[in-house]
Image (spheres, rainbow, N blue to C red):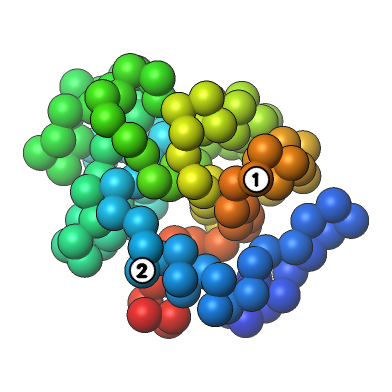
Amino acid sequence: RGLAGALSHAGPGWRNPPYEEIAGLLRSIRRIAVVGLSSKPSRPSNGVAAYLQSHGYEIVPINPNETETLGIKAFGALDDIPGRIDLVNIFRRAEYAPGVVVEAIKIGARAVWMQERVVSEEAFEIGRKAGLIMVMDLCMLKAHGQLL
């Protein structure tokens, strides 16, 4: 499934924003909390975060099992982060997504991005109702590479 398929992908309770809105989001954000970021280079979270970092985004690792990832201090939870976060990128199983979205709302994030195969209509609806820009089941690296 390519980017166009993912962007048009929708379920009963959700639909990803249009291309233009996703591109605008990627242009406007600077600081991304990556929930589930692993220090292991073989993990998708590490590759995506390294790519985003190389394209000028400030990455904030969130993983209670890590002390540092990509040369950056890791935090145990979203509410441990000093300063503002623009977007929360989720690399955890879908069952954890609703709780992560609730935390993203609490810290004042503007958007939540659930990576490929992270599908939780409950999480999507929680964020949407709170006014967050929600993206689900889409790789941020692929979207960035194709839209920008």
Tell me if 133 is positioned left or right of 69 in this view.
right
Residue neighbourhood size for the residue with mark 2, other residues' Cα within 10 Å, grouped as few (<14), some (14–19), many (≥20)? few
How far from the left and from the top, in percent, is residue 43? 34, 47
Secondary structure beneath disc 2? Answer: helix
Q: Which residue appears at 56% of the width and 62% of the height?
A: 138
Q: Which residue appears at 67% of the width and 38% of the height?
A: 130
Where is the C terminus found, in terms of image quarters? bottom left
How far from the left and from the top, in percent, is residue 4? 62, 81
Could you say which quadrant of the image residue 37 lies in? top left
Could you say which quadrant of the image residue 48 lies in? bottom left
Report if the CB atoms under discs 1 and 2 are less than 8 Å apart: no
Judging by the rendered image, the residue that carries numbered circle 2 is 27
- Closest to the camera, between mark 1 and mark 2, is 1
Where is the N terminus found, in terms of image quarters? bottom right
Q: Given the current orientation, which residue lies at the most extreme left position?
A: 71
Tell me if 20 is positioned left or right of 30 in this view.
right
How far from the left and from the top, in percent, is residue 82? 26, 24
Q: Which mark is residue 131?
A: 1
1, 52: nearer the viewer: 52
Q: CA distance from mark 1 to mark 2?
A: 19 Å
Tell me if 78 is positioned left or right of 71 in this view.
right
Residue 39 in sight from this viewpoint: yes
Of callouts 1 and 2, the N-terminal one: 2
Tell me if 69 is positioned left or right of 137 in this view.
left
Mark 1: which amino acid? Gly
Mark 2: which amino acid? Arg
Residue 61 in sight from this viewpoint: no
Q: Which residue appears at 39% of the width and 46% of the height?
A: 86
